[in-house]
Image (cartoon, rainbow, N blue to C red):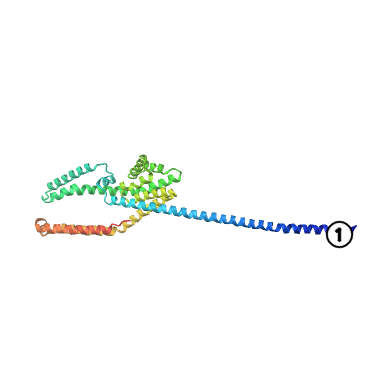
Amino acid sequence: MFGIDSTVLIFILLAGVSAGAVAYAFLFKSIENEKNVGKRLDTIKAAETDRSVVKAARDRVSEAAKRRKSVQDSLKELDEKQKANNKNTKKPPLRIQLRQAGLQVTVERFYVYSVICGVVLTIAAYMLGAPLLVLPGALLAGAFGVPRWFVSFLRARRVKAFLNEFPNALDIIVRAVKSGLPLNDGIRLIANESPEPVKTEFRRIVEAQQVGLSIPDAALRMGETMPCPEAGFFGIVIQIQSQAGGNLSEALGNLSKVLRDRKKMKAKVQALSMEAKASAVIIGALPFIVAFLVYLSSPAYIMPLFTTSTGHLILGISGIWMSIGIFVMRKMMNFEV
């Protein structure tokens, strides 16, 4: 019974193994195909992942290139606008000069004041006993020289006052932006609280915004009424930030630092040039001092310069040469920073 059972068991085992072998033989190809399909799927997924990574990298590079091109186009456009503004800044019309000087007068009224100044100066020269040949020169100097010099003096003084306060105004705007306020609120704060002439310049930006002009365009127009490079820098920073984006508070903070460094450099250059200026003053005053001392010691020796036609010619030529020397020394001592 045991032998029969063993034989049956062995037969069943062999039959099972044979059936399994036959089944594996039939299913081997299907299993191999499934493995190949799985490998191909993994390869396709990896390729898609790599393709997505490459596409994302290309998109980042393309976006950076577009932004770089946008910034370059903005800088080119701003450079053209700045060149046009520089032409008006160097030789602006009289109407713009009056605005830059902070004078609330029309061109016609300025001409009236110039004529009055010329007439008053001519009458004063006549009453002081000046020769008749000098009176036309006094009229021209009073009508054209003195009023325009006065406007230039007011322009320079206004620009100096603006540069002294402008970095502080930028710092206030930076703090306002960092605290969450929009840029126009910071500009309104400067237009209401800052001292002149910064207050007036920012008030013009606010008024331009109220009539429909954007803040970047209004900021670029600041150079028309404030003839200094620093006003142009502010407009360029606002324009680039509006077109290319970025951290406005950081950009304005860097601009404030640059303006303070420029101010320090100007002060340093002025201090280094004081020796040359003192020498120029001494050299320019020396002829008058010598002439006065000679007049005190021997007036008969120097009076022919003032009483004869030859002396007048010598004085005229000397004055021309001395003016040329003063002009050359002034150009040598003035440095643009």
Residue at the farthest left position: 308
| Mark 1 neighbour density, 10 Å: few (under 14) some (14–19) many (20 or more) | few
Question: Circle 1 sits on which residue?
Answer: 7
**Quadrant of image for the C terminus:** bottom left
Who is closer to the viewer here, 321 or 268?
321
Q: Label 1's element? A: helix
Q: Position of residue 273 (x, y in %)?
A: 29, 58
Q: Where is residue 266 in the image (x, y as percent from the top left)?
A: 33, 55
Who is closer to the viewer here, 144 or 205?
205
Who is closer to the viewer here, 143 or 240?
240
| Residue 324: quarter of image | bottom left
136 on left or right of 179: left
| Residue 313: quarter of image | bottom left
182 on left or right of 20: left
**Quadrant of image for the N terminus:** bottom right
Who is closer to the viewer here, 289 or 176?
176
Count of numbered marks: 1
311 on left or right of 45: left
The residue under label 1 is which amino acid type? Thr
Residue at the farthest top position: 210
Residue shown at 24% from the left, 46% from the top: 94
Whether residue 293 is visible here, answered yes or no, is no
Q: Where is residue 131 in the image (x, y as percent from the top left)?
A: 11, 51
Whether residue 62 is visible here, answered yes or no, is yes
182 on left or right of 232: right
| Residue 268: quarter of image | bottom left
Q: Where is residue 206 in the image (x, y as percent from the top left)?
A: 36, 41
